Image: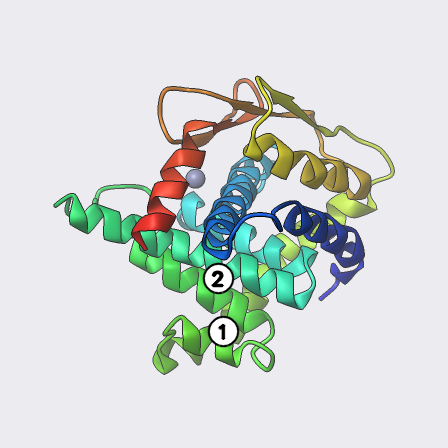
Amino acid sequence: MTLRFFIALWASIFITGCAAAETKNSSDNDIEAFVEANILGIFFHELGHALIDIEGIPIFGQEEDAADALSIFLIDAFYEEEAAQDLAYDAALGFWAEAEARDQNGDGIAWWDNHGPDEQRFYNTICIFYGADPERREQFARDLNLPEERAESCVEEFDQINKSWGELIEDLTKRQSGSKLTLRASESSLSAETLQPEIDALNQEMSLSTALTVNVAPCGEANAFYDPEERAITMCLEFEDHLRALAKNL
Ligand SMILES: [Zn+2]
């Protein structure tokens, strides 16, 4: 991997976050870790949409799949092994939890949706992460029940993503100048606390063709989206409670 130089910086961010949660009991910690991991995973997914727009990247296939691929690619690239596995585990489980909640609500799979079914997003996430380092992640794949039939192709799947997203990210890190990300938070929140250090680290390492705003604010629904007209990602504060409910339901 070419992006390992990020690791030291990102690892220190993650460790700081963990220390802050030490006073709570372990089940509360597990829930908050799940919420943080998914806020991060969702942010990296939205960053995928933003980069596709801002950098004019051609996408062959579903943009949602490409954004999911970037999300788990960055978790692999930015974090040391233990932290990366913890984040990938919770980010994958986030999709499984959405599928469980959907079934409990009696809602069918939205085959018409531009996102793949949550079960598929769950396995895609595990497969790409496993494929990045199969020797160290065999137990990870086993814990999350990645079938052998799929596991066989995961190294190749990761390599393809490394050639597409990996090369773009490397290119962004080599730019001598360019625009940056700015966080705008309406109030203090776990989302803002989680994202500010990530955005600071991204800004230290890479430059974009145009400025990108990251809004953290209430929006009346548990959602996150990228608006190409505003060149802004919005992370809705309602997502935090939605993720907590999903974690408790797992
Ligand atoms: Zn999306």
* Residue at the disc numbered 2: 89
Figure quadrant, ligand 1: top left
Residue 7 picture location, percent across and down = 75, 58
Q: As shown in the figure, which amino acid type bears the numbered disc 1?
A: Phe
User: Furthest-right residue in view?
Assistant: 176
The mark tally for this picture is: 2
Closer to us: 193 or 24: 24
* Residue at the disc numbered 1: 140
Instruction: Compare marks 2 and 1 and give the one earlier in the sequence.
Output: 2
Q: Residues within 10 Å of mark 2 (few under 14, many from 20)?
A: many
* Circles 2 and 1 in contact, beta carbons < 8 Å: yes
Q: As shown in the figure, which amino acid type bears the numbered disc 2?
A: Tyr
Q: In percent of the image, x 37 and y 37: which residue is there?
A: 242
Residue 163 picture location, percent across and down = 62, 61
Closer to us: 14 or 99: 14
User: Furthest-left residue in view?
Assistant: 106
Relative horizontal placement of residue 250, taking residue 187 as reference (left or right) = left
At numbered mark 2, what does the secondary structure look like: helix, strand or loop? helix
- Quadrant position of residue 159: bottom right
Q: In percent of the image, x 40 and y 57: which residue is there?
A: 93
Residue 174 picture location, percent across and down = 82, 47
